[in-house]
Amino acid sequence: MPTTLENWNPGKAANRHPEVTYEEKERLFFEVKNDPRYEDFLYGCYECGICVSTCPSARFYDYSPRVIAQAMAREDIERVYDIIAEDIWNCAQCFSCLRCPRGNNPGGLVTLLREVAVKNGLQETKDVLQGYSRVIYKVMLKGNQVSPDMLQPDFFPDWGPWVGQFSANMPVWRKAIPVDTLRGVTDAAWKTNRKTLLELYTIWFETGNMDIIKEIDEGLYELLADVMQEELEEG
Amino acid sequence: MNEMTTVEEILERKSHAVVRDAQVAPTHDIRESLFELEAKGELIVQRMPENHVEVTTKYGRTKKIPLEHTWHHKSCGQCGHIPGYTSSIFWLHRQFGLDYLDPTDQTSCTGWNYYASATSNAAAQAAVMVRNFAAAYETGYFPVIHCGTSYGHYKEIREQLVHHKELRDEVRRILDKLGKPLVLPEEIVHYSEWVHVMRKKFAEKQTVDMSMITATVHPACHYYKIVAEDAIYDPDIYGGQRTATVTATLEALGINVADYSTWFDCCGFGFRHVLVQRDFTRSFSVLRKIETMKNEVNPDLTVTHDTGCVTTLDKSQFAAKAHDRKVGIPVLSDAQVAALAMGAHPFRVVQFHWHSTDWRPFLEKLGINWQKYWDEFQGDLELIRAGQKSGITWEDADKPVVYA
């Protein structure tokens, strides 16, 4: 809901998300605040705006790292919920905001807010990450964020006609790379041995990372868990 | 943490240049804490190989950079989409006979995904990092990180592991299950730091004159903004007020490095944005970086030292042409430029064909007849297609090209 002259209530955040109870918003706030890293990321805020002046997202979105630091410091439960629902996915995670003279890490705060949004399966977060599932699949299973076979014209149409060339020539171009671990590999960034992948799957299960995936995309979780468990059982 | 209480104090501090004196550095030296934890038996610190050099970082502290006996923590974005970046790093090692390992027991840091989607947590990210470091430790080779994000992410995780015992205990429990020790290297080293300390040796073997080239530098955010005090600064480069990596290398190769007003801005990568919300990435990259460089210094080339920056700055330029924006600056990594300067084959090693913004004018300005080498490379591809050659190997690629 946009802020208008009618609903604008300066000094106190309007309840822009009445569908969520205050208690639930408060619970999410304290989940962020109780993260052990929180104290390393927020020391206070002078409202100097240095973080905003360096922030790429602030130039293109209605987004402000200063507001995030301020809302967290003031324990403004309503505003923090707005930020979780509407703002956090605008952050580019470049960490230019670490230029903060107070030593704050607004980008780090965003990371914590995102983790809580994901862990609690917020619908706004599910919507944002919907088109991203195939990347999560790749990184969880292969240990690589991207692979050569992702260079497809339908995925990167704005990267120009060369993407068609990459994709058309992929098998042979990949063989024409002198690096031993890259040569001929198209479904991952490099050759990773099986033992290493099994160790990675163990980490995902042991740290609760798989539960996080389940919360955000149950179908993806089923798919990943099936493959990983089968591999781990084979040993 | 430096205690500041008033705006006046901040303004006072900001009015001075960064003080390069380790005795008054505003941050704690995390490496001291690592050795303290090692003494308590909490973790192992992997020591630097004997063959290393020392450089200074932002606040004047000393950092050791290994020259060889290194375990290469590759970058998924480089290996996946810009393979000439990786092959150039290895080619440079091979030209000097420096001992290195290109391991298959490495995973990416998974930090790109973490910064993009937060579908992970602190323990998982730390366990992935330490598993990689343990794999390096088992070989006796010292890790060198190719990706700027992995480098920054690992430095931040190192801080978290030092400051939070619960996290250390959790990571140790997981590593125990994997049969691996909780080990961290004495220094977290980025490949561009190795390039930086090798730059004069590169210049000694340089065969391609680059003095007619004007380049801009995009310093990678995750290299020098995350745990900022660990990046290399040199009083001879920007008066020690900006990181010296990349710029010092280009200057050593005789390239004219031109400054531009938005040097501090990020490239617009955005992690999630570059994959699924590229309107932001393209806009920022073109309007704040490429077009500013074009308007202010019109460089022949822009050079950076991270996966995401090369990808973003290079790939974002095509669509901007539809809006008549001023684009057309080829983008390379420092390692690719250094390799090219020493005669690396433009396609077998530097792999220009994976780059999108037109690089031909740059090669032509260097006097390199790219068509000749492209034809040669096409010959390689024909043999591969015909099954007469399994692929290009170092045997094909090691020998520097002598340009006419």
Image (cartoon, helix red, strand yellow):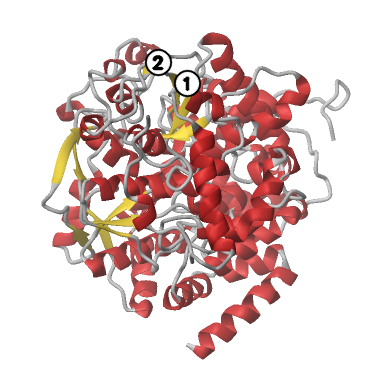
Whether labels 2 and 1 share one chain: yes
Structural distance between the alpha carbons of marks 2 and 1: 8 Å
Tell which circle, 2 or 1, labels the residue nearer the N-terminal end: 2
Q: Position of residue A96 (x, y in %)?
A: 49, 30
Q: Residue furthest bottom?
A: A234
Quarter occupied by residue B28: top left
On the image, the x and y values in percent for residue B47 come to 16, 56
Image marks 2 and 1: residues in contact by CB distance under 8 Å:
yes
- Count every numbered label the image shows and give the total: 2
- Residue B371 appearing in the image: yes
| Chain letter for mark 2 | B
- Considering only vertical position in the picture, is B94 above or below A183? above
Residue drawn at (75%, 55%), measured in percent from left and top? A130
Kindly identify the amino acid type of the residue bearing the numbered disc 2: Met
Q: Is residue A50 left or right of residue B198?
A: right
Write down the residue under mark 2. Answer: B212
Q: Is residue B187 above or below residue B384?
A: above
Residue at x-position 41% and y-position 49%: B87
